[in-house]
Image: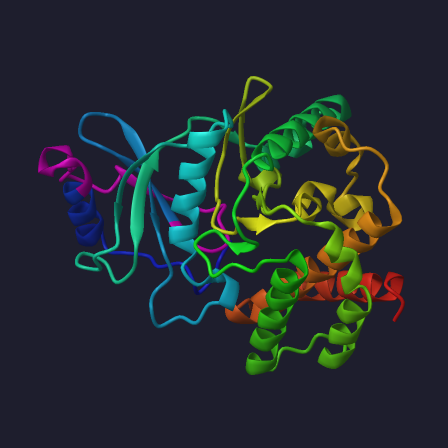
Amino acid sequence: MESITKNRQSIESLRAMVARAYGPEEVCDEGEDWVSELSHGWFNVAYRIRLRSGARVVLKIAPPPDVEVMTYERGAMATELAAMRLIREHTKVPVPAVDFADQSRELCDADYFFMTYVDADNLSVITDTLTEAEINAYDEALGAITHELNGITGTAFGPLGGPGASTWRAAFLRMVEELLGDGERRGVDLRHDYDVIREVVAAHADSLDEVTEPRFIEWDLWPGNCMVREGRIVAIIDHERAFYGDPLMEFGFTGSESSAYGDSTAFIRGYGHGPFTAAERTRRRLYNLYLALVQVIETNFRGHTDTGQYDWACERLRETVAVLGK
């Protein structure tokens, strides 16, 4: 996926980063077949690199400093590293091991880190080759994995690295307001008045008060961030959007309120969640609203030239505003 946030580097810079992380003896100095860009990501650039020893690793680089990102994306690489550490320390969910991280900006104009390469298929890439039973099995496994991740608790709601809020209502309303501020600053047309969105959220904000314990939320755990092999999920990747909040905000629940995002039945079964209460359904609709806003507004920040995502997300926003009563 193309995006102006992808911070591609020269071959010389890549070699220098490899040398710093693994030592000069691991740098391949002939040809360019030792490095290839992984094209499935939407935000950071990632390279698959073969070391001289034959080992394969992945290098992930944050956006260039002169490219404006959305408010919630600031410091995303630090969030990802913190999330991976929490997952390794508190769960058995498989994530790549981080070999080296550099925030010095000496070799590159942005933060970067190296992690182990996972030799597996991206679930979103192979979905069309799977049977319905196989897809349901993966969705169920995703539900179980998400439930385990949500078992990690925090001390405040909001970003993993703070600043946090004492209530989920305060944290979520701040997340929404930051997002709307991003859109207003860049003049993004939501096909809705911004204040109407604010009114919709405020009208249902009391449903957020049921959430009293900050839980680790992966949020972006969809098939595109799952690596699979021989019928099993062997790693989850791309953790830069994690935060502490309400487990119902996880992507796997999205289809429970909008079939446009797929069918959540198998995910919910794997997660072990019972029927939703009225307040839970309201919260899930608010979270679908937030997701649609992200999907609309990010097309501007990432410099999309194709309007496909924008048009699709605007329709999701319209549907969600309607079911919330506007």
* Outermost top residue: 230
**257 sits left or right of 247 in the view:** right
**205 sits left or right of 95 in the view:** right
Q: Quadrant of residue 24?
A: top left
Q: Is residue 288 visible?
A: no
| The one of 122 and 234 positioned closer to us in this rendering | 234
| The one of 245 and 130 positioned closer to us in this rendering | 245
Q: Quadrant of residue 184?
A: bottom right
**Residue 170: where, in percent of width, then height?**
64, 64
Q: Quadrant of residue 145?
A: top right
**Number of labelled discs?**
0
- Residue at 81%, 48% (x, y): give it: 280
Q: Is residue 271 visible?
A: yes
**Residue 48: where, in percent of width, then height?**
34, 39
Question: Can residue 156 be found in the magenta stretch?
Answer: no
| The one of 235 and 128 positioned closer to us in this rendering | 235
**321 sits left or right of 289 in the view:** right
Q: Is residue 218 above or below residue 121?
A: below
**Residue 252: where, in percent of width, then height?**
69, 41
- Residue at 77%, 51% (x, y): give it: 284
**Which coloring applies here?**
rainbow
Can you say which quadrant of the picture contains the C terminus?
bottom right
**Residue 316: where, in percent of width, then height?**
77, 60
* Outermost left residue: 25
Question: Can residue 33 be found in the magenta stretch?
Answer: yes
| The one of 214 and 147 positioned closer to us in this rendering | 214
- Residue at 25%, 63% (x, y): give it: 109
Q: Which residues are magenta?
A: 21-45
The secondary structure that most of the magenta stretch takes on is loop
- Residue at 56%, 71% (x, y): give it: 300
